[in-house]
Image (cartoon, rainbow, N blue to C red):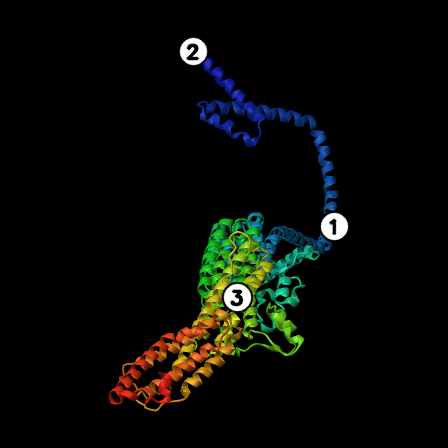
């Protein structure tokens, strides 16, 4: 039973499932019926379903039949109407066909036009798309063209900016195009090209400023010179109404005739007279002479490219090399001032450029780098100047060099460089300048002394008299009262030497200008140099003249007179120095002039030379003495040589009237003593072994002539018998010889004629006895 019940239940379920499927088939679209039918075929009740399906079909057919039977008449009517409509439709078809044929015929051109329009529209769309793409590409191409143009015109920094815009702004928008990829690949090469070209421009710039450093330096030094001239004008303006005498006024007061006797060179003005006619014109600056744009461009380019440090190192390295070349002086620099000027111009030009770079760039060079270069330049420059200036023997060139160094230092000081060492070196050159001046004045003094006639200066008019007084400070009331023509006691070398001493002082003062020295230092320098001139140069020149072989007594006497007047003029030289330095002689540590000592020494040397010269002249006369010591003749007058000697002494001592009294007296006493000594030596010389009374008689006459000369007072100032004392020893010796010979003769006569021994003597023998 249970099985029967289970079978019935399953049958019911199957029937219900089939019914569901049939409803799905009836209600579902034909395209989606596949899955439903597949579920039937997958089941086990296929046959029963088919039976069920057939039953359902038959049911539907019966329903259709019923429906058709119900509507049959309407169907027949419809068929009849359709048949009618078919005829009308055929007509309509024919009309449509005809219309279509006509339309096709008539629309063929339109179709062609439409095809053409279609192609045009397609082309238009393509063109529009192309234009849009080109609008994206054109800025890239324009920027690239602009880049090439900028590189062609060497506008490297704008080119680099253009390259940056091209790389970061424009190329990313069209990066998928092949030409853009080519550009992207070329960008590093273009950067390197810009770097190389800008570096090439920098090298050209460095080479250009190396060649034109002297012009830059010359311009800078002209500017400094103009500024210094302007400062001097400003400083002098308040002094116009001052009662204080200027240095130039002092020169005028004490140096009225300097122009006629000055040994100054035409170049004394030195570099201070650089193109005076252009002083009023504006001198261009370094930035006006040099185009620094290559440096700025290269610096910016390397900064943008991230290689600024590389650029800075390269620039500094190259400039150091150029500095070493600039600081290497030419071997013949010392020969002319232009050699020094060109050397200084190059150094100034170098540092003017570096100073400009320092102040117009940020960090390309720094103060430490500039200071390092300047220290090197300063040491090398000072060493070069010491070496080359030591070869210079022309004081005018040394003075011009000093002026050039001062201008060089002032120019660099304007740009902030310390120049104290240069002024210290100028003090060293000052000593060398003094030495060259001493050498030059040695020649001047030698020429003056050699060309002098050693005769008192004659003047025949008041004008000539005032001219001499203007050259040399001399006052003599008696000489002023004398009528013309008259003579000064000194010769021409006195005013000439005096003026040359002042000229030397003036030359020393010129060197001290612009050295930033105090008046005391200038005064001390002038006095020391003048003392060297007096004690060494002038003293040596006077000594050489005095010791000259062919010097005469007249010249020696005149030298003594001249040195006496020069000695008196030393106080005027002191006043001259005081007026030009404004330092009083009473100031502490003021050096005194040693002119008095110099002229005294020269005078003493001349006096000694006079004594020696007189003795030599006496010896020359005595060499003419020819005594016959065995003669029996008794002479009646003095020997000829002695008469000539006495005449020479009288004429010589007559010249001594202008000499100081003691000098003339000493010369006269020395001559008499030397004459007495020489005569004594003649009497006592070893070759004379026998003497006759006649020979002694002749010798006695000569001694008596000498004594007569001594009694005549050839030089005033001696007491009565003072000069005769020079011959007292000779007289005593002669008397003893005469007494001895007279005694021998009397003894001989006494032996032969005892009663007539005195009466047999001759009258002259009696006189001598």
Q: Tell me if 718 is positioned left or right of 101 in this view.
A: left
Disc 2/disc 3 C-alpha distance (Å): 181 Å
Look at the numbered discs 3 and 1 and tell me whether their residues touch, using CB distance below 8 Å.
no
Residue 231 horizontal/vertical position (percent): 64, 56
Q: Tell me if 127 is positioned left or right of 641 in this view.
A: right
Displayed quadrant of residue 76: top right
Classify the position of the N terminus by image quarter: top left
Say whether disc 2 or disc 3 marks the residue closer to the N-terminus.
2
Residue 201 horizontal/vertical position (percent): 53, 60
Most foreground residue, 602 or 424? 602
Q: Tell me if 728 is positioned left or right of 201 in this view.
A: left
Which-is-in-front pick, marks 3 and 1? 3
Displayed quadrant of residue 153: bottom right
Residue 373 appearing in the image? yes
Most foreground residue, 162 or 638? 638
Residue 750, placed above or below residue 254: below
Say whether disc 1 or disc 2 marks the residue closer to the N-terminus.
2
Residue 99, placed above or below residue 386: above
Residue 702 horizontal/vertical position (percent): 40, 83
Q: Residue at x 54, y 29 (%)?
A: 33
- Mark number displayed over residue 4: 2
Residue at which label 3 appears: 567
| Numbered disc 1: secondary structure | helix
Disc 1/disc 2 C-alpha distance (Å): 77 Å
Most foreground residue, 549 or 303? 549
Say whether disc 3 or disc 1 marks the residue closer to the N-terminus.
1
Residue ranking furthest to the left: 751
């Amino acid at each position: 039973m249970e099985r029967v019940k289970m079978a019935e239940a399953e049958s019911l379920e199957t029937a219900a499932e089939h019914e569901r499927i049939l409803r799905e088939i009836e209600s579902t679209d034909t395209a989606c019926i596949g899955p439903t039918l597949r579920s039937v075929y997958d089941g086990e009740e296929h046959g029963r379903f088919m039976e069920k399906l057939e039953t359902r079909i038959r049911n539907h057919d019966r329903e259709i039949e019923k429906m058709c039977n119900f509507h049959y008449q309407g169907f027949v009517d419809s068929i009849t109407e359709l048949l009618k409509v078919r005829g009308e439709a055929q007509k309509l078809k024919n009309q449509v066909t005809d219309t279509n044929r006509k339309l096709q015929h008539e629309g063929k051109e339109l179709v062609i036009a439409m095809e053409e329009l279609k192609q045009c529209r397609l082309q238009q769309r393509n063109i529009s798309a192309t234009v849009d793409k080109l609008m994206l590409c054109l800025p890239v191409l324009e920027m690239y063209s602009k880049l090439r143009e900028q590189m062609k015109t060497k506008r490297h920094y704008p080119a680099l900016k253009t390259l940056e815009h091209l790389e970061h702004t424009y190329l990313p928008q069209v990066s998928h195009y092949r030409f853009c990829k080519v550009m992207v690949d070329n960008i590093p090469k273009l950067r390197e090209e810009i770097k190389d070209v800008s570096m090439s421009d920098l090298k050209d710039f460095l080479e250009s400023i190396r060649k034109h450093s002297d012009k830059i330096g010359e311009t800078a030094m002209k500017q400094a010179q103009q500024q210094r001239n302007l400062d001097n004008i400003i400083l002098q303006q308040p002094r116009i109404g001052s009662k204080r005498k200027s240095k130039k006024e002092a020169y005028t007061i004490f140096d009225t005739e300097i122009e006629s006797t000055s040994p100054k060179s035409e170049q004394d003005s030195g570099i201070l007279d650089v193109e005076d006619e252009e002083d009023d014109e504006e001198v261009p600056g370094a930035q006006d002479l040099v185009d620094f744009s290559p440096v700025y461009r290269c610096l910016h380019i390397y900064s943008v490219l991230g290689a600024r440090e590389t650029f800075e190192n390269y620039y500094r390295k190259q400039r150091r090399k150029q500095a070493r070349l600039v600081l290497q002086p030419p071997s013949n620099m010392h020969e002319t001032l232009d050699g020094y000027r060109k050397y200084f111009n190059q150094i100034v030009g170098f540092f003017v450029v570096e100073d400009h770079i320092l102040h117009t760039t940020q960090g390309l060079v720094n103060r430490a780098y500039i200071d390092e270069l300047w220290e090197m330049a300063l040491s090398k420059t000072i060493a070069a100047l010491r070496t080359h200036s030591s070869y210079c023997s022309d004081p005018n060139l040394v003075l011009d060099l000093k002026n050039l160094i001062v201008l060089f230092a002032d120019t660099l000081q304007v740009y902030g460089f310390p120049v104290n060492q240069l002024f210290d070196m100028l003090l060293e050159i000052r000593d060398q300048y003094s030495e060259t001046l001493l050498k030059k004045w040695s020649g001047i003094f030698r020429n003056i002394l050699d060309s002098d006639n050693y005769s008192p200066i004659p003047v025949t008019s008041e004008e000539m008299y005032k001219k001499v007084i203007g050259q040399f400070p001399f006052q003599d009331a008696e000489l002023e009262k004398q009528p013309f023509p008259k003579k000064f006691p000194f010769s021409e070398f006195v005013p000439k030497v005096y003026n040359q001493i002042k000229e030397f002082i003036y030359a020393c003062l010129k060197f001290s200008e612009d050295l930033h020295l105090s008046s005391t230092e200038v005064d001390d320098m002038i006095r020391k140099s003048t003392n060297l001139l007096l004690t060494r140069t002038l003293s040596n020149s006077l000594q050489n003249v005095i010791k000259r072989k062919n010097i005469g007594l007249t010249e020696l006497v005149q030298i003594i007179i001249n040195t006496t007047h020069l000695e008196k003029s030393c106080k005027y030289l002191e006043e001259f120095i005081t007026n030009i330095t404004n330092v009083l002689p009473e100031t502490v540590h003021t050096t005194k002039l040693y002119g008095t000592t110099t002229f005294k020494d020269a005078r003493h040397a001349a006096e000694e030379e006079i004594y020696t010269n007189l003795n030599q002249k006496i010896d020359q006369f005595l060499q003419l003495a020819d005594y016959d010591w065995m003669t029996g003749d008794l002479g009646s007058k003095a020997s000829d040589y002695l008469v000539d000697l006495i005449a020479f002494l009288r004429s010589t001592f007559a010249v001594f009237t202008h000499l100081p009294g003691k000098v003339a007296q000493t010369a006269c006493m020395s001559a008499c003593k030397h004459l007495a000594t020489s005569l004594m030596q003649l009497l006592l010389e070893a070759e004379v072994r026998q003497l006759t009374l006649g020979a002694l008689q002749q010798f006695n006459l000569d001694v008596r002539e000498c004594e007569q000369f001594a009694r005549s007072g050839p030089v005033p100032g001696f007491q009565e018998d003072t000069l005769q004392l020079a011959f007292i020893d000779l007289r005593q010796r002669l008397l003893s010889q005469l007494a001895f010979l007279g005694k021998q003769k009397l003894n001989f006569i006494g032996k032969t004629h005892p009663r007539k021994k005195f009466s047999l003597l001759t009258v002259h023998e009696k006189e001598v006895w």
